[in-house]
Amino acid sequence: AWTVAAEEGAALLRWAVHDYFPVSGSESAASEIKAERAGNLKARERHERWRSAAGEGPEGFEGGGTDGRRSSSLACRVGCLTEYLIELLRMDACPASPPGVATALLPLDPLLDSSEVLLSFPLAAEARSRGTKPRLRSVPVPDGLVSPDGAGGIAAGIAADGHRLLGAVLSSCPSGARGKGRRVAGLALGCLRRAVSPALLSAVDGRTPASASSGLGAAIRRSVAMRTASVRTFRSVVAALGSGAAAAAGTSGQTSRGLVLVAGCLLEQASGDDGGGGDGWGTVA
């Protein structure tokens, strides 16, 4: 029962994001979601009930409700499901199991998939906004129910939920995380790369730094909260992997670059240098 509850919670989280603002617009991703729903009738019914409830009221989300209401509905759904999964991982919300059942299988891949969707949401929202004409940025995207502007307004909160969920997964099953060392380290490094200043990223990668205020991901780089969450997530990954797995082939390069980025973040903060551009530590959103 516990494993099924965790799998369904992770699936409901991905479906909510996909229906309202797809992070990946590829046909393969849509096909995977469709196949997943076809094989999980109970979770699909729960998802449809939520969509129906979200559309209730005089306007109705899908029948012409405001973009702000639709965005708030998605943010609320993501936050509630994230908290549900975290409590499951802590065993505080574990459904009743038959007598004699003492073990449960952690659905690690679905949980990591859900974490990755949430963590990549801000960059997807910004990329969609930049690729949309200004007059259409308040209009729901063709394959979803939320506009690029609406998605941008809730992006920081959804990414924060992604950090919380990934941290809970790592702390609940460090041995499982070690089995997925390359993927987990890649997730943490990707978060750091999106959050650090362009000057620091350039120093690590050896590339010409992008503008701190105009490059893709600028909103994330200006957020103190996102940079702090990324550093904490990397710390959780290193702690879960352990020194042996972190230094193993396939993950040592990722963890080494991550450590350099973390050290650079601390140095910039201590010295009062934001890495150029004057706004690297400018908001708490």
Image (cartoon, rainbow, N blue to C red):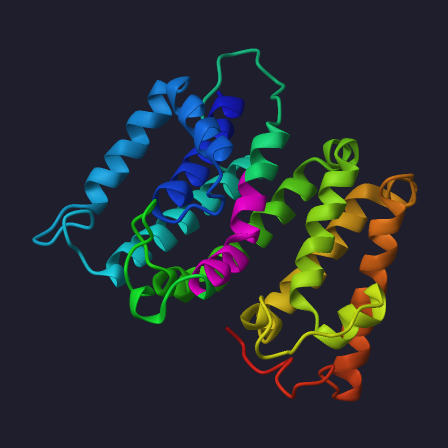
From the viewer's perspective, is residue 152 above or below residue 190?
below
Q: Nearer the viewer, residue 43 or 277?
A: 277
- Which residue appears at 54% of the width and 76% of the height? 284
From the viewer's perspective, is residue 20 above or below residue 46?
below
Residue 187 placement, left or right of 146:
right
Give the magenta-colored segment's residue range: 114-129
Pinpoint residue 280: horizontal percent, then vertical percent.
65, 80
Pinpoint residue 54: horizontal percent, then vertical percent.
23, 46
Pinpoint residue 169: horizontal percent, then vertical percent.
63, 40
> Of all residues shown, which one is farthest toward the left?
58
Q: Is residue 8 visible?
A: no
Q: Is residue 141 visible?
A: yes
Pinpoint residue 43: horizontal percent, then vertical percent.
37, 26
Number of dots carrying numbers: 0
User: Which of the 4 quarters of the picture holds residue 138?
Assistant: bottom left
Residue 49 placement, left or right of 256:
left
Q: Nearer the viewer, residue 9 or 251?
A: 251
126 falls in the magenta region:
yes
User: Which of the 4 quarters of the picture holds residue 154?
Assistant: bottom left
- Which residue appears at 19% of the width and 47% of the height? 62
From the viewer's perspective, is residue 37 above or below residue 64?
above
93 falls in the magenta region:
no
Q: Nearer the viewer, residue 254 or 237?
A: 254
Residue 277 placement, left or right of 252:
left
- Which residue appears at 68% of the width and 48% of the height? 187
User: Which of the 4 quarters of the picture holds residue 260?
Assistant: bottom right
Q: Nearer the viewer, residue 256 or 6?
A: 256
Query: Taken as a whole, is the magenta stretch helix, strand or loop?
Result: helix
- Which residue appears at 57% of the width and 76% of the height? 214
